[in-house]
Image (tube, rainbow, N blue to C red):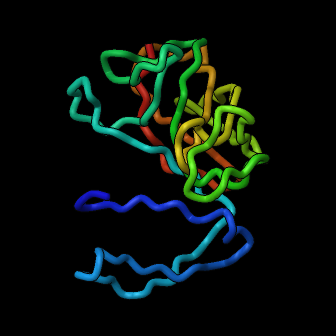
C-alpha cells in the first residue's frame, strides 16, 4: 500500500467469474464506495521501477542471472537471461493457496506461455510462472535477443492474445 497504489491478489477461487465487488477499508476509520471490478483471464502487465542508477526513467522491474537489478548501469546482456516481473498472466499448473507465498517446488508454471519481444524482436521464453517466495507475482525468464545493438528498448508481452503496455529495458 502506498499513497497512490494498493496491490491486492485476486483470489484464485474467483477464476471463471466475470466480476467481483471490491471495497477498500482502513480499519474502522474509512471505507471506499463499493466497486464492481471486471475480471479477465489475462491482463498482462510488467512491474516497473524508477531506474536506481539515476537515469530518471521508469524501467521494467527485472533481474539478471546473478539476481542483480537491471538498470541503466547494469544492463541486460544480449544472449543472456533476464528475469522479468509481471502480473495478469492467468492460470498456473500448481495453484498455491490464495494469499500464500509460492513454493520453490513444485514450480507453478503458467498454463499458456506468453510471447515476449524486445525492440520488436522475439525473445525466447524459458520460464513463465509464479515467482517462488512471492504472493501472486509472475516471473518470466527470457533470453535477450542476440541481434540487438546496445541501447534502450521497449519490451512487450502478449498472453492469451492480450498485449501488455510496453516497458523499457536497457540492453548491452
- Residue at 62% of width from left, 26% of height from top? 142
Whether 142 is drawn above or below 138: the answer is above
Whether 29 is drawn above or below 48: the answer is below
Whether 103 is drawn above or below 73: the answer is below
- Residue at 65% of width from left, 47% of height from top? 158
Q: How many marks?
A: 0
* Residue 33 position in % (x across, y down): 36, 87
Q: Is residue 144 left or right of residue 66?
A: right
* Residue 47 position in % (x across, y down): 44, 44
The extreme bottom residue here reads 33
Work out whether residue 164 or residue 10 is closer to the camera in this orientation and state it. 10
- Residue at 67% of width from left, 50% of height from top? 96
Work out whether residue 134 or residue 46 is closer to the camera in this orientation and state it. 134
Q: Quadrant of residue 80?
A: top right
Whether 89 is drawn above or below 123: the answer is below
* Residue 51 position in % (x across, y down): 29, 31
Q: Is residue 26 left or right of residue 138?
A: left
- Residue at 49% of width from left, 14% of height from top? 66
Quarter the N terminus occupies: bottom left
Q: Is residue 73 left or right of residue 47?
A: left
* Residue 11 position in % (x across, y down): 61, 65
Quarter the C terminus occupies: top left
Amino acid at each position: 500500500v502506498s499513497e497512490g497504489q494498493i496491490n491486492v491478489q485476486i483470489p484464485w477461487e474467483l477464476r471463471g467469474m466475470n466480476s467481483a465487488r471490491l471495497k477498500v477499508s482502513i480499519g474502522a476509520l474509512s471505507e471506499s464506495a463499493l466497486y464492481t471490478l471486471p475480471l479477465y483471464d489475462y491482463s498482462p502487465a510488467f512491474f516497473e521501477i524508477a531506474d536506481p542508477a539515476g537515469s530518471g526513467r521508469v524501467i521494467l522491474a527485472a533481474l539478471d542471472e546473478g539476481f542483480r537489478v537491471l538498470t541503466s548501469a547494469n544492463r541486460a546482456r544480449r544472449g543472456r537471461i533476464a528475469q522479468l516481473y509481471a502480473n495478469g498472466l492467468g492460470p498456473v499448473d500448481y495453484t498455491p493457496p490464495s494469499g500464500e507465498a509460492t513454493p520453490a517446488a513444485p514450480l507453478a508454471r503458467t498454463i499458456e506461455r506468453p510471447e515476449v519481444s524486445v525492440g520488436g524482436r522475439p525473445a525466447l521464453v524459458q520460464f513463465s510462472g509464479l515467482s517462488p517466495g512471492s504472493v501472486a507475482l509472475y516471473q518470466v525468464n527470457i533470453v535477450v535477443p542476440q541481434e540487438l545493438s546496445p541501447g534502450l528498448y521497449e519490451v512487450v508481452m502478449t498472453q492469451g492474445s492480450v498485449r501488455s503496455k510496453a516497458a523499457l529495458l536497457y540492453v548491452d
